[in-house]
Amino acid sequence: MTDAMSGPRGAKPKKALSRNNIIVYGTLFVVAIYYALPLYVMIVTSLKGMPEIRMGNIFAPPMEVTFQPWVKAWAEACTGINCDGLSRGFWNSVRILIPSVVISISVASVTGYVLSMWKFKGSEVFFSMLMIGAFIPYQVMLYPIVILLREAGLYGSLSGLVLVHLAFGMPINTLLFRNYFASIPEELFKAARVDGAGFWAIFVKIVMPMSLPIFVVSMIIQVTGIWNDFLFGVTYISSPDRYPMTVQLNNIVNSVQGVKEYNVNMAATLLTGLVPLVIYFASGKLFVRGIAAGAVKG
Amino acid sequence: MSHSVQIKSLDLQFGAVKVLKNLNLDIHEGEFLVLLGSSGCGKSTLLNCIAGLLEPTDGQIWIKGKNVTWAEPSERGIGMVFQSYALYPQMTVKGNLSFGLKNAKVPKAEIDKRVARAAEVLQIEALLDRKPGALSGGQRQRVAIGRALVRDVDVFLFDEPLSNLDAKLRADLRVELKRLHNQLENTMIYVTHDQVEAMTLADRIAIMKGGNIMQLGTPDEIYNRPQNIYVADFIGSPSMNFIEGQYSNGVFSKGELSLPMTGYEYVAPKTADRGATIGIRPEHVITGELVSGAPVKVEVDVDIVEPMGSDTLVWAHLAGKPFRIRMDGSARVSAKERLTIGIDPSRASLFDTKTENRL
Ligand SMILES: Nc1ncnc2c1ncn2[C@@H]1O[C@H](COP(=O)(O)OP(=O)(O)OP(=O)(O)O)[C@@H](O)[C@H]1O
Ligand SMILES: [Mg+2]
């Protein structure tokens, strides 16, 4: 008779370097390099002086680190007649971004709340119409909106652009909120009504605290979408004074006068990408949770 | 006895589907009323109407002598306990209990007092600072009951509050609910599809089917004098045996089976001859030594014997129909045996085959 305890026992040992693992990690490594390399080149280039760049080795780290290109990109680079760098575009973008994000999230979350919990006659029709709006290509509406804004006297102004961002962000954000709120058990909503909570009390005290992740998801989508927008910026803003940062970046990088200052261009590009980057890092964890979160458990 | 909740000709439609049909129900002050019925018969819908969470298509709801048909849920003096508990996940137990009071702008000191009292009654004092996620199912249900308790409501509404719990806990909480009702003396309306819960808890049971009330009565009436075949069949496990036959001159007959209905209490004083169905509960069949004293004796063929410990279920045939008999657990019966049983017509139920109503 064999010993009852001989043979496999306890946790199954795992091979650290199995063939599958090597393939998986190898692939991941290559892909990571592929993504990280351009970023690396941009950063080192932005820290070099022009003479060093002309030497031609784009992968070499800077021999002499200089922040001059960053300063120039932010405060001195010229577009058209203005020579105050990207800072002007940055503040324009901020002035577009904040009202667009705050208003669209407020309106979309309340709309989603109504569509999921306070259904009224025709609410499904209303929702379907909103969804059709989400699927019409932007290009189709580009010019009609120019006319609408001109009629309203808002063409070329920042508020006109904010209005456009609000309109285009509404369907997707409403859908996002409605679907998330729909996963909140109906009985919770009923219990709150029995407890005497009204429309706003239920939203603020019950629904919102349960839905933080979806607010973060919506904020990230809005912030990155609006910050990175180029098309609406060039279309609806008429004066270089009011161009958002992306449009100004394009003008700096594509300017044909003088020598191409690669270091300044790189710094300008990095500066423009900074805001979405910060948002991602600050809320990445919540973002993942929001997307992964299914039903809300009691 | 004064009325607590009155439902008058209530109709409710979802689109084209009629879910409640001209429903009338009078519930007494301090009564424990159970709404019992199979899935989809409209129990929850009726409860939600009483709570004010659903708007009826027609009819009225009165609570404590006031017409509350158009009143908000919070204005009706009701508290509701849900099947899924529906506790607010981001609030502590204390927050859950006090939410309704805060909405009603009750002063802080009063809130603390009432929360403490409810916690004491429900024995959840130690849990007040926990979140619902950190509670067991039974504890959550207690908190859910507490939420109705603190608000000092006239009427408690329960929608299958115990159905998510395991059998042992369900039995415990059932007893606790009964104790709570004795202690508080509130009106309680309780939805379930569990017969045992209904029979043990109820002062009266309303059996529902397809949006109508089939019978309203005490558990004893429902069990012993079902008003129609649906109720007779629905209540009791194993369910009642039915034999379709003829009723004439005070005798029920089917083939060679002939049962003089001596001692049977008729609904109407004079009952005309007609096609009738007799219903006999498996546990009302007389067996063993008692057979000799039974009013009517018949012989049946045994098909299958199912010993269940405390008692034995015998599947037999009577008048060509399957016939279940519940015998004592110590009874010795074997399949294929011919068994003599006794029937007491005074404990049987007689129905008109056409209308399915009790005779
Ligand atoms: N919002 C709704 N829209 C359409 N039909 C509904 C709606 N809610 C319920 N119903 C229908 O109404 C009927 C009664 O539903 P109800 O929830 O009252 O049943 P119930 O007796 O509580 O059943 P259960 O024991 O399964 O909880 C069902 O046939 C159901 O399909
Ligand atoms: Mg139900």
Image: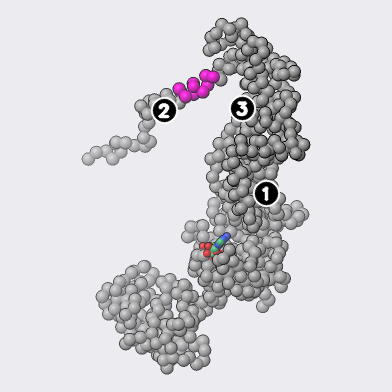
Q: Chain of mark 1?
A: A
Q: Which of the two residues, B94 or B59, is positioned nearer the viewer here?
A: B59
Q: Amino acid at mark 1?
A: Phe
Q: Amino acid at mark 2?
A: Val
Ligand 1 falls in which quarter?
Answer: bottom right
- B208 vs A129, left or right, is left
Q: Which of the two residues, B226 or B177, is positioned nearer the viewer here?
A: B226
Q: Position of residue A240 (x, y in %)?
A: 73, 24
| Mark 1 residue element | helix
Q: Chain of mark 3?
A: A
- Specify start and end residues of the magenta stretch as a single range: A29-38
Residue A31 among magenta residues: yes
- B8 vs A57, left or right, is right
Q: Answer with the quarter of the image where residue A151 lies.
A: top right
Q: Amino acid at mark 3?
A: Leu
Q: Are marks 1 and 2 in contact (CB under 8 Å)?
A: no
Q: Answer with the quarter of the image where residue B298 lies.
A: bottom left
Residue labelled with disc 1: A203
Residue labelled with disc 3: A277
Residue B275 among magenta residues: no
Q: Are marks 3 and 1 on the same chain?
A: yes
